[in-house]
Amino acid sequence: MVTDSGVSQSRRKRIVDGLNQNDGFPQIMGIINVTSDSFFEGSRSLSSEDAIERALAMWDSGATWVDIGGESTRPGAAPVDEESEIQRVVPVIKALRKANPEGLISIDTRHASVAHEGLKAGADMVNDVSGLRDKAMIDTVREWEAAICIMHMQGEPGTMQSKPHYVNCVEEVTAYLAEQRSQLIGQGHPKELICIDPGIGFGKDHTHNLALLQAGKSIGEDTSVSVLWGVSRKRIVGHLTGHEHADDRLAGTLGLAAVAVAKGIDLLRVHDVQEHVDLFLTMKPFD
């Protein structure tokens, strides 16, 4: 059976399953940056061919999702025009959908026009770091009956780390995500196709980040709400370990992945898929 959007029930089930932890461990989402300026140099793909090869390798290593992005949203990043973003990501998504019809693909964008083209090309989810600021995004995900990850970001990428301020970070982030999620559900989008992301490092200082990680799944209205963490090689790992360069933050990232297991987090967005798969395989006999 196929829904009005053309999504089969079996595919819908795979997408929903992919938004929830697997046997007590987070699903793994591999990061594919079709950019030249993402904060971790090792994640940059300067050609479609390289991005496709990396994504296929991530699936082979055990990733549930590959997340394809054409605009860096690191602190201080300059915006990319939407047409350029489309030209970067759509060929990759089309090729991956052809190469692996069953694989789950996310498009990492804050622009509804880019999301539309990515979903048309074969993506299953929109990873929206702006948390539905582009109001056309709601219509886009409803039209395609797509999954959506709603992330919290204070400010804009170019300025978001310039003195971020909250009265109570956890309460404010929780309230914002609940409001955006409720708005989407209220307009008819299935709640099981929505996950939320506290936005570690997006308009937060070290204290804010730690508080949000400590809160874990409680940033959702209840434990059934799917929660994604994006902490891979980020500055918080550098603060915790003393490593200035992202190249040196893998071990610390894996430490936070173990914390994610303890906190019941559903998805982890990571640069290093094989290492996370190995970590979870090692932990499973002792779970």
Image (cartoon, rainbow, N blue to C red):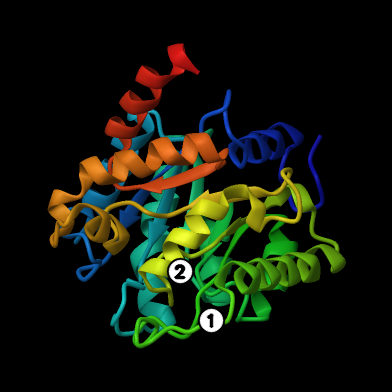
Q: Are marks 1 and 2 in contact (CB under 8 Å)?
A: yes
Inspect the image, locate mark 2, and give the three-letter code of the amino acid beneath it: His
Identity, as a three-letter code, of the amino acid under mark 1? Tyr
* Precedes in sequence: disc 1 or disc 2: 1
Whether residue 26 is visible: no
**Which numbered tag is attached to residue 166?**
1
Q: Nearer the viewer, residue 83 or 216?
A: 216
- Residue at image x 43%, y 80%? 82
Report helix, strand or loop for mark 2: helix
The residue that appears at 38% across and 62% down in the rendered structure is 69
Residue 136, position as x, y percentages in the image: 67, 79
Which of the 4 image quadrants contains residue 16?
Answer: top right
> Mark 2 — residue?
208
Asked if residue 244 lies left or right of residue 224, the reply is left
**Of residues 42 and 69, which is closer to you in this image?**
42
Quadrant occupied by the N terminus: top right
- Residue shown at 73% from the left, 64% from the top: 181
Coordinates of residue 169 in the picture (x, y in percent): 55, 72
